[in-house]
Image: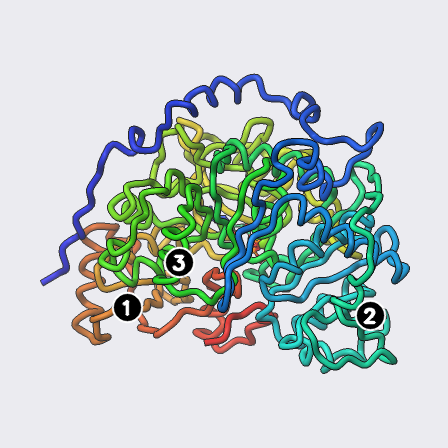
Amino acid sequence: MAAKRPKIIKKDLKRVSVKPNLLNYEKTYRSFSYKKVEKELAWLGKGKLNAAHDAVDKHLNTWRKNKVALYWIGDECDKKYTFLELAQLSNQFANALVEQKIKKEDRVFLFLPRIPELYFSFLGILKTGAIAGTMFAAFGPDAIYDRLHDSGASVVITSPELKPRIDKIRKKLPDLKTVIVTGSVKVNSRKGEVLFNDMMKGQSRNFKTKEMKPKDKAYMLYTSGTTGKPKGVVHTHYDIIHQYMTSKWVLDLQEEDVYWCTADPGWVTGIAYGILGPWANGTSSVVDARRFSAEKWYDTLEKYRVTVWYTAPTAIRMMMKEGSKLAKKFDLSSLRHMCSVGEPLNPEAVYWGLNTMGLVFHDNWWQTETGGILIANYPGMAVKPGSMGKPFPGIKAAIVDEHGKIKKTGKEGNLAIKPGWPSMMIEVWKNPVKYKEYFKNGWYITGDKAKVDKDGYFWFIGRADDVINTAGHRVGPFEVESALVAHPAIAEAGVIGKPDEMFGEIIKAFVSLNKGYKPNDGLKKDIQHFMKRYHAGHAYPKEIEFRDNLPKTRSGKIMRRVLKCQELGLPVGDISTLEDD
Ligand code: ATP
Ligand code: MG
């Protein structure tokens, strides 16, 4: 017998997500202009600014000087840093970099776990006018080499545990002059190795932050590598205006909040909404540096009385996999707003949030290239589960065809944005050709397929390359995956189009199972039956393969291109960001 569709408590989503003080936002949106908001930035002289100053130092003239900016959670202890402490530590580090002759636009890369040094050295780099680059701590030597080599970084900051990976490739990196190591280990000064703590010693806590033009470069990082080789995306100091506004209006950060962004600064979310945006709003942020476990995460939410939580679909699905029982053991009553980004958020996850925490996950969409949230479900807005929401004020988004012409409402096409929003990337490092390829007929083409409904909500369909053509029907992998994860046995699903003589392509699903379910043919049939009955006759997976885990980027995105290449026996291309099993 086919599994029953799980019971979904469809409360009034609109009512649940509305906070009275947010209702005014709709009005504010209408009169929004970036020029007006610019007044709220902390300018350094005429027409000059520095994102690090705006994020941290500007608060030193206010009561927030001694407010906790960072609640840091490690394996062995927890620590706290006020805005004043972050300002002083980043000043000391900036002084140390200047002593090393670091100057404007030099690339200084961070290859660190989420330790406090990562946060204040990022700010210190920006203060000198150099470009800060980030790399996720789980990268292996090849991925690190690609990034340090491509960017021509002259300094890298790392930890004793991660340093051996740099040692392996050091000879091939002639531009890399200095390796700064945290902790206390033996270093070889003849090789340009220096201890972080030695550099900081004796440095002044004051530093004259470099005054930058708004479009001067501030930080760079490489895309997630979900669809191909990661691209070196460069961002400017002016990004902060958009990150500040979206932190305020989309994440709804307010003075008394304790906010937790679970992203690592190796990815753009960890920079824009783990460092710059929330601190520019003077918000207290939590960083949990420990390895993921659902239990630890619930504990962090409870212990720090987190009020606003920004996370990603993979993490949510991992928590769902553990079941609601675990969640019920914790007091999560402090939470008042939850957001998600990075991948399509399955409606099932929205309902789970509602049933487990009494709150709706507010999905939002953006990319490394966009530097900030562009499409979002705002607080106070009726959430349509499965939709990414509406464009942020000042952002013009549309669905366009191959020539960059706007398509009719409801028609699927390329998600495109009118260029010129403040946090738009300024270049792809050393690759002007690649940069140019993003633009067509006056639009920035995102590489995602989507549609927009009559209420102006955007719906993600899939990556341009992932859309399936089966028996003449175009099917987005996301909707099939969302339907699959509604089956009680399925924890995660990745769907691809497999070439087929008869149908052009057939749908093949790779699924991992929830605890307590065993893979077998009976279950396959049950899933297919469930899909035909509750989803669509034409869009059910003709083939299903059980996997313990699905291939994912280190930022947690399902890599459908890897599933497809494995299925077709083709070379998988760049997998430097592939997660280990
Ligand atoms: P690469 O460009 O190297 O292939 P990537 O596109 O995964 O990697 P990111 O910039 O980290 O690199 O991710 C942006 C992409 O993530 C978007 O283009 C989109 O495909 C996906 N994404 C982000 N947020 C959402 C969302 N809310 N719903 C659906 N997809 C999303
Ligand atoms: Mg991309």
Residue pointed to by mark 1: 513
Residue at 31 percent across and 43 percent down: it is 333
Callout 2 crowding tier (Cα within 10 Å): few <14, some 14–19, many ≥20? some
Callout 3 crowding tier (Cα within 10 Å): few <14, some 14–19, many ≥20? some
Marks 3 and 1, the one that precedes in the sequence: 3
Q: Position of residue 378 (x, y in %)?
A: 45, 32
Residue at 64 percent across and 40 percent down: it is 444
Residue at 19 percent across and 69 percent down: it is 523
Q: Which residue type carries mark 1?
A: Leu
- Note whether ligand 1 is within 8 Å of mark 3: no
From the viewer's side, name the closer residue of 231 and 320.
Answer: 320
Residue 330 in sight: yes
From the viewer's side, name the closer residue of 51 and 432.
Answer: 51
Residue 440 in sight: no
Marks 2 and 1, the one that precedes in the sequence: 2
The tag on residue 178 is: 2
Residue pointed to by mark 3: 297
